[in-house]
Image (cartoon, helix red, strand yellow):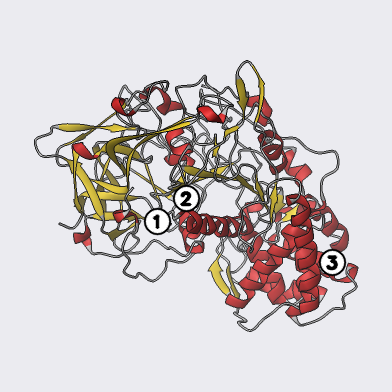
Amino acid sequence: MRGSAPEDVKRTPRSALRRSATAVAAAALLLPLVSAAPSAGAGQPGPDALQRAFTDAAARFHVPRSVLLGVSYLESRWDGHSGAPSVSGGYGPMHLTDARTALSSVVQEFSGAGEDPRGDSSRARRTVHADRAKPTVPAELPARLRTLPLAAKLTGLPAAKLRTDPAANVLGGAALLAAEQRKLGLGTSADPAKWYAAVAHYAGEDDTKGGAVFADEVYDVMRSGQARTTDAGQRVTLAAAPGLTADSAQAKRIGKGATAGRAATAGQATRPECPSSVACESVPAPYEEFGDGDYGNHDKADRPRDQRVDAIVIHDTEGSWETSLRLVQDPTYVSWHYTIRSSDGLIAQHVPTKDVAWHAGNWYINSHSVGIEHEGFLAAPDAWYTEAMYRTSARLVRYLSHKYDVPLDRQHILGHDNVPGTTTATIGGMHTDPGPYWDWDHYFKLLGEPFVRDAGPWGGLVTIRPDYDANKPVYTDCEKAGTTCAPHGSAAVRLHTAPREDAPLVSDIGQSPDGHAATTGVNDTGARATTGQQYAVAGRSGDWTAIWYLGQKAWFHNPDDEPTAVDTEGLIATPKRGRADIPVYGRAYPEKAAYPAGVPVQDVSPLPYKLAAGQKYAIGERMRGEYFYAPTFDVSKHTVVRGKDVYYEIQLGHRVGYVRAADVNVRSSDS
């Protein structure tokens, strides 16, 4: 998702003073790209063509233009994505769904040994078979996944045109809204307030819970207004209507349906932990024994009373909503706390947040985090994330942040691709989702914590923040090895060994012990810095900035006229004076003396990276060594081991790492 850069304001980092291989398969959705616009030249539409299309469609089907624009913004932010479908099979600015057509072209490939989702070396590896994650196509698709065929019938336009022509797609969306208004027995009205129920049903008449929240978000968009340039260069504006409210009778009717549905679902299990502003249901993950001393698919705990929750991990499902819910209910599979649906942002909770889900591949992080899966595919740039999903996710994360006092910054809101390997042996198998196409800048604006400049060059740190729309580095290996991914906005910048474009990319010795440079592969995180991550400045040369990264200087293009990072300040860790270098760890485990009898001592094994004297790394968290021992289904044997050793979480590379407080000096980056 995209957004204009916010006005820079002064902020103090909240994290600075806090005390404190088989696995889920990495699959790729391969969807055909069909050009949605004529070739460059005389036939190229003008930059206001899409705005006119909304005006024309509104007039033809007697739908208020603001309603049409609001629905489209929440579905796609008015982007056409070159005619490629979203993960839920939605096409074009109006997200007209034709999931059977979209899924017919899905190819899944599995690569790498994968990670052990538990990431706990004290237990047998949790083996997950890749073929379980293959997509399933139900014999009868729900209404929310087949709106495009109905739009074709209502408009008389071919389905192919609705998929690839933005103007036709907008007509199809207007026809659907008008049809819903008629079906509900509501007359045509020029008053946007009178379209609330039709908007709620647009998201999928089979689900009143998601529809009510979808409608609330659409009306919020109409009240605030929006303006942006789309991925096809179209300028679209929705004027603000701050006094707009939905028709009270319609809102009450839809709201009652949503509440009833949520209560009925919740009555079958623990009521889901979600803010009141979202649609949330309970789809419990099983906690049960199934033989040979094994059980699934999470661990009982009592957080935060016996353990801090200091991170929220963002994932993508690498599969459909239906497939993901099927898998998380399998006791022999793995688990996560929440899944969010693409089409309307519906949330399903699977594991209570007090319990530990097996989702991140690192037991230390699992035991201190909440994991949220988003319906999507990291290696399919045009299998896009909807605005409805981004917004619902942001509401959930704000709620969890408040509940557990988790700071809203990139040291605590991690991608799965920011989670470190537990040991040298596990680095290569760690997952790489949500990947370079997740729009962290837009996401943090929705969280209410935009990334801003709060210092000059003297601040000593930079926060990565490229313009997502304009930043389109070449990625490879989306469809298969050696192929080039479709051009697309990205949250990541490339890191070089010298301040020039033709310099080799830096090397990640954890992934390439032979010292080979990182690649442009979409799953290769070895030379990548992503929006929101903070790094200590190691040098500047013209339009280039160097940062300390994996024990080396790493350069990225950062011109003054189109900056890809903003200056900031905070706390940094640097090796103690007299130390030639210090080790880095993938988990903050306690010292040997802290373990009681009966609890096996966990190795504190350093990663292959060395931080040399004079290098500096941004600090995200301070914590004492801790290990949650949960070896059996019998919770009476669960033990939390706490040590005296203190650690700091640092921004090591693309992933975080941990250093011992005894090995570093901590100071302000501007000193």
Q: Which residue is mark 3?
A: 180
For the view shown, which residue lies furthest in the top direction? 292
Q: Quadrant of residue 660?
A: top left
- Mark 2 and mark 3: span between their CA atoms? 36 Å
Count residues near mark 2 (Cα–Cα under 10 Å), then give few for <14, some for 14-19, many for 20+. many
Q: Quadrant of residue 373?
A: top right
Give the residue at x 75% y 37%.
104
Which kind of residue does numbered mark 3 sit on?
Answer: Glu
Q: Which residue is mark 2?
A: 490
In the image, taking residue 508 as reference, residue 571 lies left or right, namely: left
Which kind of residue does numbered mark 2 sit on?
Answer: Ser
Say what secondary structure mark 1 lies in: loop
* Residue in front for this viewpoint, 560 or 593: 593
Q: Which residue is mark 1?
A: 466
Give the residue at x 70% y 47%.
282
For the view shown, which residue lies furthest in the left direction? 578
